[in-house]
């Protein structure tokens, strides 16, 4: 909530105005208190818009539609005056987060929660449809969460089924990604009926169960096209709910169940307060509620006669202030979408905490989506832990953008993040190309970007020579050959053969060069030979045969493809080699294990990430991570989740210092503090790597080995190499 401005009214029709919930081009939504003490969300429309007969008619329709809906799971209308000079509409105020905010903070919600949520939303829609109304904009931002259940809001485009649309001709009504195909096609009003709401409900259920939109993200045209022509992506929807969700998302409205049928399929729409919510959300809702109840009485803004009776004309009141007193909102959606998790009361004043945004730009749908999900989860856990601290000086909101592993999408996502005035930094690109694309866009605005996965070479992001905005607290990819090389040195290996996979281009060439320049066991006259496999060949037999002819004491695969590494492993095994074999992080993927089969056994890999289960100091983190994401004790923590968690804590450390220093630009303060102050995590130390602190970069290298068909974390590369297996 934002404080009132001097030109804002102190009261409207007997409602005491407490603060601003949001504003838009049409008006302002205020938090207000009625004469009886009830809290309300009061929407006030600018007089210039109300002067438009068409707009005023739409507002009358919104008020009438909202007043006709009286079910338990919708917000009730407390009062309205569509005929006033500045029309207003007051509804119940629900202090809990929106469903969109809950998923952004907590990720996908568990099945029982979604069943209860769906049953209650379906009940609300069934009541609407029985009253002859269609909502037409069912989406996560229009669902508020309370302890006893959700509340459906924003009836600004609701209308009678079959009625003539009051919108512009051929206007698409609804929110892309949650609207029905018949809405996306801008069909005649007769086609947009109750079945459209059921389709939108199916989208909401899929999103809540998986954390991802069933028709993807991106430009409006692309999302609309997929909605009309493509099948939804329902991977991750539990099998028990999949048939119902798929039925709701049928392209033909006639093939969808009714809202009442959805309610019946999901079970009882009632239930005791709080029991339907997963851990964390009841506390958040209770905190928001107590914060609102503790609000101080706002200081008077406009000049209002305290003796003025409630029924007096507002014209005299408004004459005391500027016409600009009433800024705008085009529906209750406006303030919902602008709300953030911030605003915790502090001390006895109830003053809200400042809220800042950290952007998460990662791959959630492309080739590195598994690592991207691990990063997002680690970042989210760190932020949730920070926001739960009693001594936090501010709160942090996450805004997640899926780049799909594509540079163009990463650049667009970075520009979208920059529109948030509270943005202080961005974390998480999973690939070098996406980091460069996003980095160029963010660098122009001086916004810091950090990644624990991408390896961006000097000069690849613009402007880094004068202003450092990109931070990469991970070892260089070129150094990942070091762990296996160190293992061979500890074993006294003198002859090392390298199978050079030329499909890897520069990477394999540089790996061979570095190994020849710095061979294992240099004090014993170590020698490295290389044996190439051309990029267009999958026959590793000849290269392996040539390598084994040198009688090697260790064989290194220099490449990036898990499949081609597996082919190399199989060729080595087929030709009888049983000595040490190794490669790097790129090849250590499930595909390597699947294709190599028994030939993968014993292979070593150098990586820049850890398995926190192998670190005694990480026990608290692994317990919290598994609890948060409902993982079994034997389920591994995803790759890079640990590093992303610690990267976030490093960024939060930098932000906290910037806030305490009262710097003019927090983004600049974060940038400077990242350069000045390393962060000592339980996995490694996070700092800006330079040629001067190369040993620190080496400290971020780790050794793994395949044992029993499973990759096993051996620890820091030098300690693990000395210890042996």
Image (cartoon, rainbow, N blue to C red):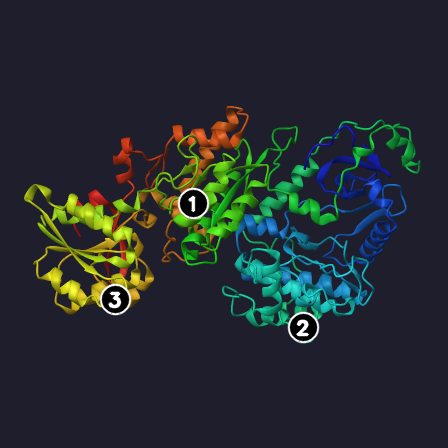
Which residue is at the front of the view, 668 or 712?
Answer: 668
Callout 2–callout 1 Cβ contact below 8 Å: no
Q: CA distance from mark 3 to mark 2?
A: 53 Å
Which residue is at the front of the view, 10 or 315?
Answer: 315
Asked if 696 appears above or below 644 in the picture, the reply is: above
x%, y% of residue 86?
Answer: 85, 41
- SS category of the residue bearing label 2: loop
On the picture, is 274 further left or further right than 654?
right
- SS category of the residue bearing label 3: loop
Q: Residues within 10 Å of mark 2 (few under 14, many from 20)?
A: many
Find residue 436 and name its label: 1
Q: CA distance from mark 2 to mark 1?
A: 47 Å
x%, y% of residue 697?
Answer: 29, 38
Q: In terms of image quadrants, where is residue 262?
A: bottom right
Q: Residues within 10 Å of mark 3 (few under 14, many from 20)?
A: few
Q: Which residue is mark 3?
A: 537
Decide if residue 327 is in sight here: yes
User: If you read the primary sequence from the N terminus, does the residue marked by circle 1 or circle 3 appear first?
Assistant: 1
Q: Residue at x 70, y 54 (%)?
A: 151
Q: Nearer the viewer, mark 2 or mark 1?
A: 1
Callout 3–callout 2 Cβ contact below 8 Å: no
Find residue 257 and name its label: 2
Q: How many marks?
A: 3
- SS category of the residue bearing label 1: helix
Decide if residue 143 is in sight here: no
Q: CA distance from mark 1 to mark 3?
A: 31 Å
Q: In terms of image quadrants, where is residue 207?
A: bottom right
User: If you read the primary sequence from the N terminus, does the residue marked by circle 3 or circle 2 appear first?
Assistant: 2
Asked if 675 appears above or below 201 in the picture, the reply is: above
x%, y% of residue 389?
Answer: 51, 36
x%, y% of residue 563?
Answer: 29, 64
């Amino acid at each position: 909530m934002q404080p009132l401005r001097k030109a804002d009214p102190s009261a409207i029709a007997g409602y005491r105005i407490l603060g601003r919930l949001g504003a838009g081009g049409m008006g302002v939504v205020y938090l207000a208190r009625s004469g009886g003490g009830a809290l309300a969300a009061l929407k006030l429309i600018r007089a210039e818009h109300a002067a438009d007969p068409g707009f005023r008619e739409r507002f009358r329709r919104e008020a009438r539609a909202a007043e006709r809906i009286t079910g338990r799971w919708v917000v009730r209308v407390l009062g309205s005056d569509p005929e006033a000079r500045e029309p207003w509409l007051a509804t119940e105020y629900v202090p809990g987060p929106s469903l969109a905010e809950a998923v952004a903070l907590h990720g996908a919600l568990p099945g029982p929660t979604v069943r209860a949520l769906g049953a209650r939303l379906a009940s609300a829609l069934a009541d609407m449809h029985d009253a002859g109304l269609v909502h037409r904009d069912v989406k996560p931002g229009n669902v508020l969460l309370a302890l006893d259940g959700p509340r459906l809001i924003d009836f600004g485009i609701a209308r009678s089924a079959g009625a003539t649309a009051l919108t512009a001709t051929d206007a698409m009504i609804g929110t892309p990604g949650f609207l029905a195909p018949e809405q996306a096609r801008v069909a005649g009003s007769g086609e947009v009926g109750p079945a459209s709401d059921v389709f939108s409900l199916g989208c909401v259920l899929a999103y809540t169960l998986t954390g991802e939109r069933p028709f993807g993200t991106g430009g409006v045209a692309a999302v609309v096209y997929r909605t009309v022509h493509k099948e939804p992506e329902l991977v991750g929807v539990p099998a028990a709910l999949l048939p119902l969700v798929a039925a709701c998302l049928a392209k033909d409205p006639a093939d969808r169940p009714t809202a009442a049928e959805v309610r019946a399929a999901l079970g009882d729409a009632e239930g005791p307060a709080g029991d339907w919510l997963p851990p964390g959300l009841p506390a958040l809702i209770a905190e928001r509620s107590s914060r609102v109840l503790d609000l101080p009485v706002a200081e008077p803004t406009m000049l209002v006669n305290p003796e003025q009776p409630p029924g007096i004309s507002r014209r005299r009141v408004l004459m005391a202030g500027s016409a600009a007193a009433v800024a705008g909102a085009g529906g209750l959606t406006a303030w919902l979408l602008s709300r953030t998790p911030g605003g915790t009361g502090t001390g006895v004043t109830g003053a809200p905490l400042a809220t800042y945004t950290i952007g998460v730009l990662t791959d959630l749908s492309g080739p590195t989506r598994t690592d991207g999900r691990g990063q997002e989860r680690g970042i989210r856990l760190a932020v949730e832990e920070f926001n739960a601290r009693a001594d936090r000086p501010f709160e942090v909101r996450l805004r997640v953008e899926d780049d799909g592993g594509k540079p163009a999408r990463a650049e667009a996502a970075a520009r979208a993040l920059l529109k948030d005035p509270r943005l202080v930094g961005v974390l998480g690109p999973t690939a070098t190309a996406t980091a460069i694309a996003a980095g160029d866009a963010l660098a122009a605005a001086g916004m810091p970007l950090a990644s624990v996965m991408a390896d961006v070479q000097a000069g690849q992001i613009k402007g880094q020579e004068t202003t450092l905005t990109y931070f990469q607290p991970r070892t260089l990819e070129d150094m990942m050959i070091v762990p296996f090389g160190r293992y061979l040195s500890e074993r006294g290996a003198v002859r090392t053969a390298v199978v050079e996979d030329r499909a890897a281009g520069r990477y394999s060439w540089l790996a061979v060069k570095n190994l020849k320049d710095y061979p294992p066991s240099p004090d014993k006259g170590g020698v490295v030979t290389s044996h190439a496999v051309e990029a267009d060949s999958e026959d590793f037999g000849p290269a392996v045969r040539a390598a084994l002819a040198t009688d090697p004491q260790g064989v290194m695969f220099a490449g990036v493809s898990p499949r081609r590494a597996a082919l190399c492993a199989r060729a080595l095994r087929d030709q009888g080699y049983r000595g040490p074999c190794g490669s790097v992080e790129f090849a250590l993927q499930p595909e390597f294990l699947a294709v190599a089969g028994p030939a993968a056994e014993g292979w070593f890999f150098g990586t820049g990430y850890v398995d926190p289960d192998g670190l005694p100091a990480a026990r608290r983190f692994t317990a919290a991570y598994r609890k948060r994401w409902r993982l079994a004790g034997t389920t591994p923590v995803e790759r890079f989740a640990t590093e992303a968690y610690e990267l976030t804590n490093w960024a939060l450390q930098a932000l906290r210092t910037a806030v305490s220093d009262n710097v003019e630009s927090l983004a600049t303060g974060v940038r400077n503090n990242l350069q000045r102050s390393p962060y000592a995590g339980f996995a490694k130390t996070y700092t800006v790597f330079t040629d001067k602190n190369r040993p620190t970069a080496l400290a971020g290298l780790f050794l793994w080995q395949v044992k029993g068909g499973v990759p096993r974390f051996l620890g820091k590369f030098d300690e693990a190499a000395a210890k042996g297996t």
